Amino acid sequence: MDDDKRLEAFQAKIDREEKIEPRDWMPEDYRKHLIRQISQHAHSEVVGMQPEGNYITRAPSLRAKVVLLAKIQDEAGHGLYLYSAAETLGITRDELLEQLHGGKAKYSSIFNYPTLNWADIGAVGWLVDGAAIVNQVSLQRTSYGPYSRGMVRICKEESFHQRQGYEIMADMAKGTPEQKAMAQDALNRLWWPSLMMFGPHDADSPRSGNALKWKIKRETNDELRQKFIDKTVQQAEVIGLTIPDPDLKWNEETGHYDSGEINWEEFYNVVKGNGPCNNQRLTHHKRAHDEGAWVREAANAYAKKQLEKSKVA
Amino acid sequence: MEVKDALIQYCLRLGDDAMIMGHRLSELCSNGPILEEDIAMTNISLDLFGQTRIIYTYAAELEGKGRSEDDLAYLRPEHEFQCALLTEQPNGHFGNTMARQMIFSVFYYHLFKELSKSPDESLAAFAAKSLKETTYHMRHACEWVVRLGDGTEESKWKIQDALNDIWSYHHELFEKDEVDEKLIDMGIITDTATIADDFYASVNEVIERATLGTPAGGWKATGGRSGRHSEYLGHILSVFQSLPRAYPDAKW
């Protein structure tokens, strides 16, 4: 079969809403796009452990500590799961990490912002996981089988995280004046970066065309962002916090909230590596990886010795 | 000493060991040599904090002064903690962490096996639950000591050094004072002397499989059970307790 026919069959399969599986033929660009997207997602889960881990040792109650530890453990598990999904496309985890360390692979820019008070841990769950869920719910229907199945599982856990985060925010918002100030401060700092998580406006999103045609993405950046805004504004109102957007208002006609313009200069600046924590996050990940090299080598050497022993025996 | 008072102190010691060990492991989040190990160490930390909560809650109940698990964790000063110095020691490199964990988990594995037979139902239930978790922690740490010992040349000297360094801290786990004596007399806990042989047998078996040398004697750390700690504990608590201390009126 020539490539045109293959491509036609591939597209027809996608149009019939059938999943593409690892052994199926797929266009090289589809494979590349998926590797980029899944690895970016995996790296985000893993790098995201840093800003949340920043508060593990200072969690203000034993219950809060256990909940946070469990959450971060979930995120690490998602990372593993997604690395495995990426590996089904013919790339190794080592290669994916090299791409991360070399700056070729990205992770979500939200994790290049610092966590500066305990309410940030609430805000990360409520807003960051909240935004991630909107995206991931949509991705449950993505055309690549392993990714789609991964998303189904991940979504279940993320919705827990989102509720736990919101609970922290709610508790702080009704707490002492200092706690309420921390909650509002966290919202002020993390609201706009959360909106940026959905990426550029549709008109400025160069890769969306094929991704939508191939049903890797099911909804556009702006559609997903709007869904997030619509569901989050009310949640903020309920707990008495103010979304830091003076232009935010309900639009009767559209049935959605209108909102102010995102600071795209800041967005592109952070994507390019100039956010408050880009360097810190990457240096941390590299350091941990490099410091662990002797452990990985030892484990490999031991496994090799065991294999040789079992051959002799 | 009243039996009840001894039991309260004993439970606090179990809780303090679990909490400070859990804290050290929690510091390792996002610092593991591979992602799987990051998950494993966070998981052990999580188990230890779970144990902390159960046993603190029981201690507070026995005490009957209306204190909560968080009061015990967050509002006691350094000298009221009674954790063994072993648990306070820094994580160091992965080999240091695993050597420390092996000693801690092997000791507690054998102790929990005994405590799970205690006539004190709450203590027995706590030990039985913790035993399941500790069995996994012990296997995990022991397997790593073996891998590192029988891995590369570098890993061998690193884990041997780590073991030699931490060895001074295992004696304290077996120490006994009037708290232990009282509870042993009443048949509530087992004398740690009865698990010593099992402890050394388990550790020696790992050391042998790891092709390592037995760590030498030397200095014996002590003091934790009477509130005299290493310098590390103050730093741990200053971080751990920072928020409730800074905002005493806040509920979290």
Image (tube, coloured by chain):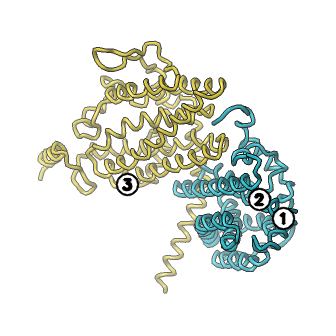
- The x and y percentages for residue B146 are 62, 72
Please state which of residues A217 and A292 is positioned toward the viewer in this rendering: A217
Q: The disc labelled 1 sits on which kind of residue?
A: Val
Where is mark 3, residue-wise?
A: A87
| Nearer to us: label 1 or label 2 | 1
For this view, does B217 lie left or right of residue B137? Answer: right
Q: Which chain carries label 2?
A: B
The residue under label 1 is B179
A137 left or right of A300 in image: left
The amino acid type found where label 3 is placed reads Glu
Mark 1 and mark 2 residues within 8 Å of each other at the beta carbon: yes
Same chain, marks 1 and 2? yes
Q: Pick whichever, A161 or B63, lies toward us.
A: B63
For discs 1 and 3, the disc positioned in front in the rendered view = 1
For the colour yellow, the matching chain is: A
Chain at tag 3? A
Q: Where is residue A204 in the image (x, y as percent from the top left)?
A: 33, 24
Most extreme residue toward the front, as rendered?
B64
Q: Disc 1 or 2, which lies upstream in sequence? A: 2
**Distance of label 1 from label 2 (alpha carbons):** 10 Å
| Chain B palette colour | cyan
Mark number displayed over residue B13: 2
Could you say which quadrant of the image residue B139 lies in?
Answer: bottom right
Question: Could you tell me which residue is drawn at 40 percent across and 17 percent down?
Answer: A259
